[in-house]
Amino acid sequence: MKILHVSRTMGQGGAEKIVYQLCRDNKEHEQYVISCGGHYVEELQKIGVKHFVMSDIDKKNPFLMLVCLYKIWKVIHTEKIDIIHTHHRMAAFYARIISMLSKVKHVYTAHSIFYDKRKLMRYALENCEIVAVGNGVKNNLVHVYGIPDERINIIYNSVKIEQENYLKEDMLRKSKGGKNFIGNIGRLTKQKGIDVFINAIADIVREFPNVVGVIIGEGEEHIYLETLVEELAISNNIIFLGYQKNILQIISQLDFVVHSSRHEGLPLIPIETFSQGKTIIASDISGNNEIVKDGVNGFLFEKDNVKELSERMKKLLTNMELREKLERNAQEEYVKKYDYRLFLEGYNLAYKNVI
């Protein structure tokens, strides 16, 4: 079958990585992508997946909406697409219209939690196969948007462990010099709470001067966050690495990870962290607390609570026995619940169900 993935972007982000992984590793189907572009476009081209460019599907301009609808329809018609797999609410809306006018089938993956556009969502998700990336996202669809529970299947996000990651140059460790590296990975936006992480680093550096916060990602808050680091006088304790493709390799070199988001669907970062046998401190929000079990495979802290986060960080820095226990449990959780084979099989079943 021919599958067209419709995503707002193919830039830095968990949903975009899921699209890329499905295109790269689901060999049972021929994959295509349409989006407004981003980092993963080059990677798609390297693996021979056609990417089509359209404007941002979240724009409210009626003319641009019609152009987006036409471009998606044109790809479906030209490439003889069997299934349109949408990864954004407006993409699902366009797919609903197109599926009424053609034989193309529709699969929608809900990656995040929302509370608005209720009428649009109910209309867009009629007569399609619905996937939620976790229980929190499923509950959101049921209780906020009125989608029947039995219509929604959960397929947990996952990541493929690439063996070559362990063979590449040791980016951080070769210059470690007794330092403790704590990572924070994600788009540099208010949602991701990087400011909370930076303030927590500032809170502990007097007691732990060898701590270095490693921030991986790009985004509109970059200048603000760099200014914050300077104001807190911790420039020697923070590294901005920017966008990086080899996330698993970097995680494998960290002491542990902090995920300080203010809201999520089912984030990939904790799963990627567990896949490397590392533990994580995550904000206690829906999505994070579905993966991270406090005191079992990681720690949770109250969202935006810098003091609580810094106390959790101190605990992992001083208690190696505890940290090693959390790491073992984290790796076991990945194997049991987030195995990559289950992820691919789940989507192949979703495609079969809709045909």
Image (cartoon, helix red, strand yellow):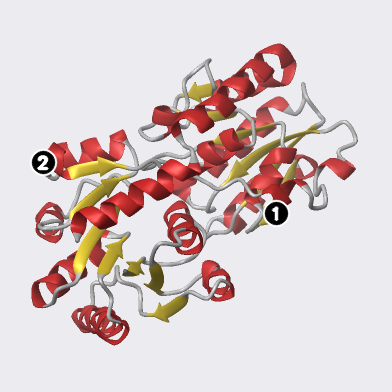
- Is 189 situated above or below 274? below
Question: Closer to the observer: label 1 or label 2?
Answer: 2
In whole angstroms, how far apart are the C-alphas of marks 1 and 2? 43 Å
Task: Locate residue 8: give its quadrant.
Answer: bottom left
Residue in the foreground of this view, choosing between 97 and 213: 97
Residue highlighted by disc 2: 148
- Furthest-front residue in this view: 28
Residue in the foreground of this view, choosing between 34 and 226: 34
User: Crowding at label 2, few (<14), some or many (≥20) Cα neighbours within 10 Å?
Assistant: few
List x then y, in percent, for residue 232.
Answer: 69, 39
Residue in the foreground of this view, choosing between 95 and 203: 95
Which mark sits nearer the N-terminus, 1 or 2? 2
- Asked if residue 144 shows in the view, the reply is no
Residue in the foreground of this view, choosing between 111 and 63: 111
List x then y, in percent, for residue 303.
Answer: 44, 30
* Residue at figure coordinates x 51%, y 27% from the top left: 333
